[in-house]
Amino acid sequence: MCGSLVISYDIYILRRIDVILLLCLFQSRPCLAGGEAYELYLKGDLSKAASSYFDEAAAQPAEARPLLNAAMCLKQAGRYAEAARAMTRALVRAPHDPDIYSELGWLRFHQADYTGASSAFETAIRIQTLHARAELGLASVYSNLEEKEKTLLHLEKYRALRPDFAGVDYILAWNYMNFKMHKEAEEALVEALRKDPSFTEARLPLAGIYARQGKFNEAWNQYYRVLDYAPGHPVASKMMKVLEGKLTKQPEEIRPPFRISKPLVMEPLDALQKLSGSVKIRVGIGTGSTGKQGRNNILKIKSFEGLTVTGKASGKLFANIPADAVWTVTGEEGRVVLKDPAGNIFGRFAGPILVKPGRPAGSVIFSASPKTSNPWFRGADRQYRGYIELYPNGARGIGAVNVIENELYLLGVVPSEVAPQWPYESLKAQAVLARTQVLIRRARGGQHKKDGYHLCDGQHCQAYKGMSNEHNTTSRAVVDTEGEILTYHGRPAYTFYHSNCGGSVQASKEVNGWGDSPYLMTKHDIAPDKPQTPLDPWEFQLWITGNPMANCNYPGRVRASEFRWMKIIRRKDMTFRVNKDYSIGELLDIIPLRRSPSGNVNSVMLVGEKRSVTVAKEHLIRNILGFSSLKSTLFEVEINRFKDGKIRNYWLYGGGWGHAIGMCQSGAAGLAGKYNKTYKEIMDFYFPGTAIRRIKYVKKNK
Ligand SMILES: [Zn+2]
Ligand SMILES: [Zn+2]
């Protein structure tokens, strides 16, 4: 049952949002409790945690688990030799556990003890024939020993066991390159990218292979695609400039922009008409990762039904743009300059102008142009309902804001955030969360107040690709949930969400700067009837390197590479990246300290030759470990060293995509698709204690 709240143009209820913060003082109890050693481990007090686990081991002489937990704490602290000794002791207590042999093998491998490593891996495989991680371990041993045949044999076995995992193809490619098998490397990289298009570390070497073969257009295109996922990537940006003179085609021919050539035909949805009765919101479009508008030097505008251009303050009509005609707007010396196709100037505006479609149900299209400096308007036509406000925006050229009714805006948000083919109830869940986000951000007005809009159109607020992205399924989900928001004690809830949690969501209070809300708690993202047991250090190791069951582990609907991922980063690349932000000299160790019970790393120590730093902000942790950001903070690091202790490279095993707070979008798809849960049950699962209520939009006369 939905209650009814009346929301005025000012959404006055939300003015009392501070009350929510008071309510949040009542701390939620972590629902995954463990012992004292476990608490020390979560805090990052790794030496004490290890001692405490050793005490447990002494008190329980038959149990291997405390020794394994101690070993994992020591390993996380970078003390691999001691960790290996604890593992050996654990084997006395549990001599037939293949996982212990396999992890012991890895500890030895990372210390360049290849004989010891291969014997441990082989024992693991003798006990359990199909042991994926031991196969990868053997392959890695032979790879470092440069034994081609054996390396490839074991990698193939590993691939057979983890066929959906893009990391396999990446490791294969890495080895093919070492063995100078460029053709095979190319195939493996293409395969890795098919499974995970965001895999920057696979795209860069592929571009390099193309460039070496003289396929400059293909190489350029690959570097361009790196920038899609890692804007400003230093290597990709530099290489694109290097290649520019060698291209045999125009950039627009190599990568033709997406064009909108005819009006969008939606399944008849009479209800869409009704949606235009909601409140208007302002959305900044073409914004970057911080939510600020990109630099717009030139914009091309057109429509299917004609456009009017009026002054925002004066209301004066400056131009009627006929249907299909493409006009140009440029930012020149602090003015917005409007030109027709012949170049005639229709005004130089020092204030905002409004570009409105000829019919209320029409749209404004930004026609993609290679001359535009903002990539958002360069690669694809962009189409928007409502109308567009353009204004001089200082050094950023032209500011562009989409003014649109809230419910119509949601038609563009839901399919930008989740796959329209996903189970229907998960689409409805997304619609409710996105709507609640708008109300909270509109009322708070804080984050983008200076920018002149309520929300940006990127991940920073919520993804919004406008009308061209709309789908019938997602539009129906907006209509079916019209006006519904998630509330806690009668007030809008903080409806955070993320793409994929990797198997556990984390409480907001675990993460610096996210506040504390009683309904944003740590829990495993598994079917509601499954037990919630804590991931102790040993369990976490097997869980993060394996392929465990979870709502968001949903083959066929969710990319496996979003649930589990891995990277191998070279020593010099990691040192270079870290020193860009902190001059600590040669990087000697990476030690995850504080972990949420979900496994997410919420502070990490970077040990350098000159000094050490501790990084404790979610986005900083994700950005500093490598050239392209990590998908999440849910990871573990293994450091591979030469015999003399010098670092060879860093292995990162990770899970999930996003901050892991609130609703896991992939998990919602799993709950709806695998367990037939309704959107209300999905809300109850991710936001326990909240309720769905329906708001009424009431327009206030100004
Ligand atoms: Zn934003
Ligand atoms: Zn999840």
Image (cartoon, grey):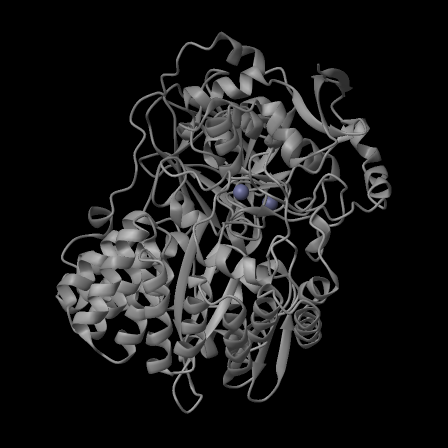
Q: In which quadrant of the rendered view does residue 519 lie?
A: top right
Give residue 249's position: percent from left, percent from top: 16, 53
Q: Position of residue 236 (x, y in %)?
A: 34, 64
Tell which of 472 and 549 is nearer to you. 549
For this rendering, which residue is in front, 145 or 132?
A: 132
Image check: 403 left or right of 44? left
The image quadrant of residue 698 is top right
**Quarter holding the N terminus?**
top right
Residue 326 visible? The answer is yes
Q: Name the side, left or right, on which 53 lies relative to 288.
A: right
Residue most extreme to the front: 62
- Residue at horizontal 34 percent and vertical 81 percent from the top: 114
Q: Could one spot residue 203 in this view of the protein? A: no
In the rendered image of this protein, does residue 693 appear above or below residue 210? above
Q: Indicate the quadrant where residue 470 lies.
A: top left
Q: How many marks?
A: 0
Residue lying at 36% horizontally and 17% vertically, measured from the top left: 265
Please give left or right for residue 269 compared with residue 69 in the image: left
The quarter of the rendered structure image containing the C terminus is: top right
Ligand 1 quadrant assignment: top right
Vertical placement of residue 392 versus 423, above or below: below
Q: Residue at x 68, y 35 (%)?
A: 687
499 or 373: nearer the eye? 499
Q: Position of residue 34 (x, y in %)?
A: 71, 56
Q: Is residue 205 above or below residue 289?
A: below
Question: In percent of the image, x 52 and y 31: which residue is there?
Answer: 671
Q: Position of residue 436 (x, y in %)?
A: 66, 31
